[in-house]
Amino acid sequence: MTAGVFSYSAVLMGSPILLKLFDDNPTLARHVFQLIKQQENLFTVNRAESEVMSINHAAGRHPVIVSEPVFALISVAHAVSLLPESAFNFTIGPVVKRWKIGFQGRAVPPALEIASLLKLTDPHQVLLNPAERSVFLQQPGMEIDLGAIAKGYIADRVQAFLRQQGVQQALINLGGNVQTLGSPPHEPQGWGIGLKKPFGRDDELLGVLQVQGKSVVTSGIYERYFELDGRCWHHIFDPQTGYPLDNELLSVTVISDRSIDGDIYTTLLYGMGVEQGLAYLADQPDIDAVFVTRDRQIICSSPHHFHFQQLDFDWQLRY
Ligand code: ADP
Ligand code: MG
Ligand code: MG
């Protein structure tokens, strides 16, 4: 444990939240948690009311005028969803709601039902009007879900808030979305962020990523899933099929400046798989990734912005 570190925790967005500071400043921590809660209240689809829910409730009926942050985040999610062969689709809501993975979902829905829900997940059917900041879902039954991007956006908001408060060294972990400021005092190699062993205990790590002032986002199939017929049905869906993405990956971790990028790229890279993902990243010097595969490999893209220290040697590390 680093000397002089003060940790504050809360449960928000259905996730454990951890804030590390190097002053004892519970007031600042309270403000950070308030900021997170206020943002969650805008974006959540796990409650009856939020700005995003008001868009969903008006699907097929009328556009809804939203606040600036909601319009901004939806605009980004829309653009990413329209990228060629994107595995990211922010209109996946009806599919997510039907599977209920991570909530009470324990069964595979009938194929016909999935097929008919998929018709409600076309991002081209979302009409954005920047002049009046309105969002219109053109088909009744369409539902926006920002679960794959909101935590990243909020982590960046927290980082900006802390910076504005004069904080130079801090870490915020929003249940797997880590954003940092600087490095811990007297630890020039940076923050050590554990890479979890898939399906392992919380304290079982494959290794530790060392970063300075970077975001580290992990998306894994072992976070929220149920098991049935020898398969793991997890919460990252293939927008083409409406079933959980089924490939060689157990997790993808993205190291980037902005946590929103980390959140987006984990989903995009999840869809690409290792080989296509590595080829894609070769042209993206600002984005690094670590892939963990079913055949026990840990594969790092050229590590521009992190150092990886392996701890579990039952897994094979390659670059
Ligand atoms: P985590 O919840 O572990 O942070 P992600 O950032 O990968 O994981 O987000 C997963 C969430 O994103 C799901 O719970 C669901 O709400 C939503 N989602 C699932 N599949 C997709 C997809 N293909 N595109 C966009 N959002 C998705
Ligand atoms: Mg994500
Ligand atoms: Mg996430």
Image (cartoon, grey):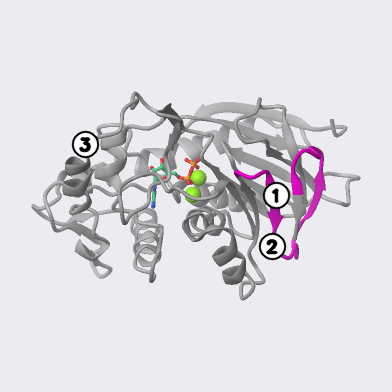
When the figure is inspected, residue 268 is found, relative to residue 186, above or below; the finding is below
- State the residue in front, 281 or 110: 110
Tag 1 near tag 3, CB within 8 Å: no
Residue 217 horizontal/vertical position (percent): 60, 48
**10 Å crowding of disc 1: few (<14), some (14-19), many (20+):** many
Of the two numbered discs 1 and 3 on the same chain, state the one appearing first in sequence.
3
- Residue 313 in magenta stretch: yes
Mark 3 falls on what kind of element?
loop
Mark 1 falls on what kind of element?
strand
Q: Which residue is drawn at the image coordinates 38% and 71% (left, top)?
A: 84
Residue tagged 3: 110
Residue 302 horizontal/vertical position (percent): 73, 65
Q: Is residue 64 left or right of residue 235?
A: left
Residue tagged 1: 298
Q: Is residue 55 left or right of residue 206?
A: left
Residue tagged 2: 301
Q: Residue furthest bottom?
A: 283
Q: Which residue is drawn at the image coordinates 70% and 49% (left, top)?
A: 298
